[in-house]
Image: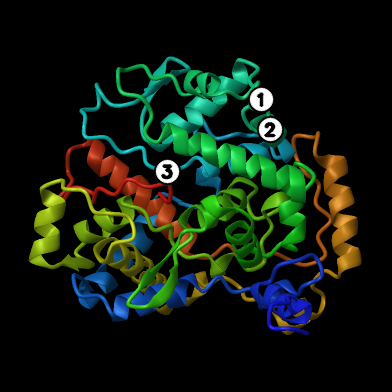
Amino acid sequence: MSDDEVDPELIALLRKTLGLGGASDPRTAQTKVLENAQYAFDNAIDVALNVPKTKEAAETIWRLMQKKEYSTQTWSEHELHPEAKDENTVNFIFTMDLLNFSFWSELSTEERFAIEYRGKRWTGYWSLVAALQRALDENIPITTPGFWTKEDECTEDLIKHVFRSATDEEIPLLQERLQCLREAGRVLCREYEGSFVNCLYNANYSAAALVNLLAESFSCFRDETTFHGRRVRIYKRAQILVADLWACFNGEGYGEFHDIDKITMFADYRIPQMLHQLGCLMYSPPLESHIRSLKPIPSGSNWEIELRATSIWCVELIRREIERRHPEMKSTPLSNATRKNSPSPEENEARRDQQKKCSTQKHIKKESVHEPTGMGINAVLIDFFLYDTMKDLEKDGQESIPHHRTRSIWY
């Protein structure tokens, strides 16, 4: 073999290590997000952790989550999130998180980009969900990957119509959103028979494997950068896509990921803001002044990486502290017996056939070949809770610091 030829065995080994491919063992999949975040935190200069405050925050978060009975059920309780538990909902969630980025605005609530739907005006993330629901009501197949590739039908003007605003401000990064749709449509049609469900099957019900598959197959999910000469993976939208599936389906059917606890928090601009409000994150004077002055922070800059990575590590420490104080809430790990009974390729194929038969029904009757992990406290639920809490504080005008301003497709 010459130096220019690709070693197929090396490629196969790499894919197996990442947990990719139908025949690979999903238990080997690792996203590397957490260890990369710890590396960035260890080498951060302008963002630090207040350990005592982080421990205090862990107990506060725990108590509030218990008081509000916060769980995966909370996800489906919102009026805009889809209720059906079928393949159409999987497509909706994929489309939603494919386009789930950069909704912040410098304008007032009355002037910023907003979607009018069901008699209400929606902003931020909810403007995206409302726009997709409105488009489906108008019989626009906005969640169909094959449609995205038809440039004569899925035109720029149509996408503008889908995201038409109730105000004078248009949706940010419209061209980038259209490019995400085009790329995802081409990849799904070329490699996954035009259906994101086949990505789930390919990942063998592994959350980490699915995150890696998204980052490998779709450049618009490849949220990674370089920090002090080392590659840092953050994968915000890939991870939140997995988390939304898990929450929507309550850890069953299309949302049954036995390794959901490998998913970290989703590093955006709201969670660092909330963690700073709780006293967990501390900023250097130059960085804090920059954020308070509402000055933009470039995507991929050291400041931005430190903010996102330290937030990931902070939520991990909060999760560990909650488990230390309340061990009964620790998610049940896979036992040795369960590991031995993990699905074989043949069993996975049978499950795929079963789920395809059920895809037109409202609820999937799952024939499980292994028990899902326990619904304890994990980074996903902590992130969801912190995000919702920060939005409530913002609505009541109780923010102690603005969120940082970074305009990108990553969050």
Question: Residue 47, how many percent across, how many down?
Answer: 21, 69
Question: Residue 376, how many percent across, how many down?
Answer: 53, 65
Question: Residue 410, how many percent across, how many down?
Answer: 43, 51
Q: Distance between the Cα atoms at labels 2 and 1?
A: 6 Å
The secondary structure type at the circle numbered 2 is loop
* Residue at image mark 3: 101
* Residue at image mark 2: 144
Q: Distance between the Cα atoms at labels 1 and 3?
A: 21 Å
The secondary structure type at the circle numbered 1 is loop
Mark 2 touching mark 1, by CB under 8 A? yes
Q: Residue 388 vs residue 130: left or right? A: left
Residue 5 is marked as none
Vertical arrangement, residue 155 with respect to residue 23, above or below: above
Q: Quadrant of residue 184?
A: top right
**Of the image marks 1 and 3, the number of the one nearer the N terminus:** 3
Q: Residue 183 vs residue 347: left or right? A: left
* Residue at image mark 1: 141
| Residue at 38%, 29% in the rendered image | 171
Q: Identity of the amino acid at label 3? A: Phe
Q: Identity of the amino acid at label 1? A: Pro
- Specify the quadrant that holds the N terminus: bottom right
In front of the other: 149 or 327: 149
